[in-house]
Image (spheres, rainbow, N blue to C red):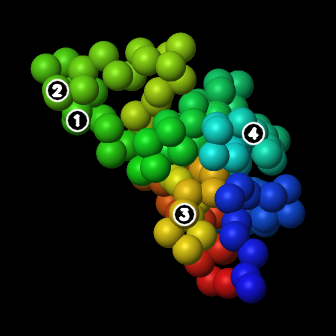
Amino acid sequence: MSRQITTIDYETAQRVVAAVIDEATGRQVAMAVVVTDPAGDPVAVARMDGANAVAFRLAVDKAYTAVAFGAPSHNWAEATAPGGADWGMANAAGGRILVLPGGLPIRVGGQVIGAVGVSGAAPSVDLACAEAGCAVLAAE
């Protein structure tokens, strides 16, 4: 009988953080990275030397958005813009919904076990670093 994974554990979260930091280092950018459990609570965090002071808070909110909706944080940008179908959603949940690139759900066997949020560089770089974090699990 195989064990059902329902939440990311600390060891796995640390591997995601390490993969993000490796990607960021290779790109010569300083990032903040947060890995959350399915409730959006941090399991592992890091803020690289030189990361912008606001990067950590943005990373937390990107991860929260990704885990709350089970989709990349930036998927909601168009829908939450003024006039969009979900306009105002970005202010929901105490302002924790952040629709910028860099937040991705972490899935194992199709199940969301957490999320990663990355911030500190251009949006496309934040997303690429988050993807590197998720890729470490996909390779297993």
Of badges 4 and 1, nearer the viewer stands 4
Distance CA(mark 2)–CA(mark 1): 6 Å
Distance CA(mark 4)–CA(mark 3): 18 Å
Compared to residue 104, the image places residue 41 above or below, namely above
Distance CA(mark 3)–CA(mark 1): 25 Å
Residue at the front extreme, as displayed: 1
Of badges 3 and 2, nearer the viewer stands 3
Give left or right: position of 44 versus 39: right
Give left or right: position of 41 versus 99: right
Asked if labels 1 and 4 touch by Cβ distance under 8 angstroms, the answer is: no
Which image quadrant: the N terminus? Answer: bottom right
Q: What's the mark number on residue 111?
A: 3
Which image quadrant: the C terminus? Answer: bottom right
Query: Looking at the image, which residue is at 64% across and 63% down?
Result: 133
* Marks 3 and 1, the one that precedes in the sequence: 1
Asked if labels 2 and 3 touch by Cβ distance under 8 angstroms, the answer is: no
Residue position marked by numbered label 1 in the rendering: 78
Q: Secondary structure beneath disc 2?
A: loop
Of badges 4 and 3, nearer the viewer stands 3
Give residue 117's quadrant in the image. top right
Q: What amino acid type is highlighted by mark number 1? A: Glu
Residue position marked by numbered label 2 in the rendering: 84
* Image coords of residue 82 (percent x, y): 19, 18
Q: What's the mark number on residue 42?
A: 4
Asked if labels 1 and 2 touch by Cβ distance under 8 angstroms, the answer is: yes
* Marks 3 and 2, the one that precedes in the sequence: 2
Q: What amino acid type is highlighted by mark number 4? A: Pro
- 37 or 72, which lies in front? 37
* Image coords of residue 115 (percent x, y): 60, 50
* Image coords of residue 44 (percent x, y): 80, 47
